[in-house]
Amino acid sequence: MATGLHSMFAPLCCSAMSAAASHWDQLHDQRRFRPVYPNENVVRFLIASCLNANAVSSLRFLDIGVGAGRHTRLAIELGLASYGADISYTGLHHARQRLQGTGSPIRLVQGSMLALPFPDNSFDLALGFGVFYYGTRDQMRLAIAEMRRVLAVRGRGFVVLRTHEDYRFGKGEELEPNTFRLSISETNEFGTIQHFVTSHDVVTYFSQFTSINLERTETTFAAGKYKNSDWLITVEK
């Protein structure tokens, strides 16, 4: 596996991926789009995984869409052998800075969720937080399949997807059922393509896993004007 930024410069394979990389480069270049504290649901997943492990240091963890590295840093602090992949070079640059001083090797690579640059069965744990819903239905399914491919047998994954109750649903051009090119201005997501899923979709999309645990979380902002609605999905290969 790659162990540093020196391995990150392979050209992205198509113009669509290059455009996506450019979008996220622009966002990660702004401090307000580089959260510092890990999401509480990711904290629960990682701590539970560590508590159930015989030897935490032997567990290999992959953060798909590592961004600026907040969840990878947590995984390192918990003692996991941690890796991160992201399509954004700028995000990886900031992730590298965040991971310095942890005393752990910095293992970051540039790559798409649609073609993870790792061998089959490489990881015990994998995270797809706020990543897989950026794209079409087929791209989401491919990203899920890629996560399954790199997980070892009995490996566990944690994925967050958006429900139909999320306020973003329907806000923009519909490209296919439940997939929209967003036209919203409240967040940093103008122009992004997002796919929204039902509970039935979740069961279908993750059908190749041996177990699926599905929860739901909702929060509001702007004095209750807008609602974030997400599926919290824990799976085992």
Image (spheres, grey):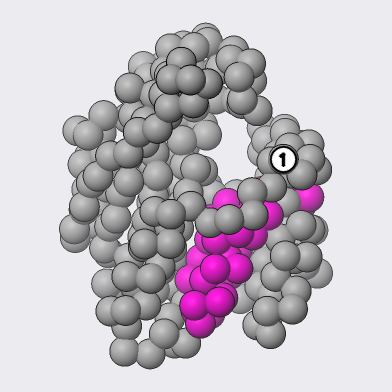
Q: Where 231 sits versus 213, above or below?
A: above
Residue lying at the far front in this picture: please name it.
Answer: 223
List x then y, in percent, for residue 136: 47, 29
Residue 6 included in the magenta stretch of the image = no
Q: Amino acid at mark 1?
A: Arg
The residue positioned 32% from the left and 39% from the top of the image is 217
Coordinates of residue 94 in the picture (x, y in percent): 76, 57
Which quarter of the image is occupied by the C terminus? bottom left
| Residue sitting at x 32%, y 46% | 232
Residue farthest along the bottom direction in this orientation? 55
Confirm whether residue 11 shows in the render. no
Q: Secondary structure at mark 1?
A: helix
* Residue 70 among those drawn in magenta: yes
Q: Can you see residue 45?
A: yes
Q: Is residue 216 left or right of residue 174?
A: left
Find disc 1 in the rendering and name its residue. 32
Report x, y in % for residue 38: 53, 56
Number of marks in the image? 1
**In the image shown, does 220 or 120 lie closer to the viewer?**
220
Residue 234 image offset from top left, x and y in percent = 29, 55
Residue found at x 18% / y 58%? 211
How dense is the environment of label 1, judged by Cα within 10 Å: few (below 14), some, or many (20 and up)?
A: few
Left or right, 187 with respect to 203, comes to right
In front of the other: 24 or 218? 218
Q: Report the residue at 48% width, 20% height from top.
A: 223
Q: Which residues are magenta?
A: 61-90
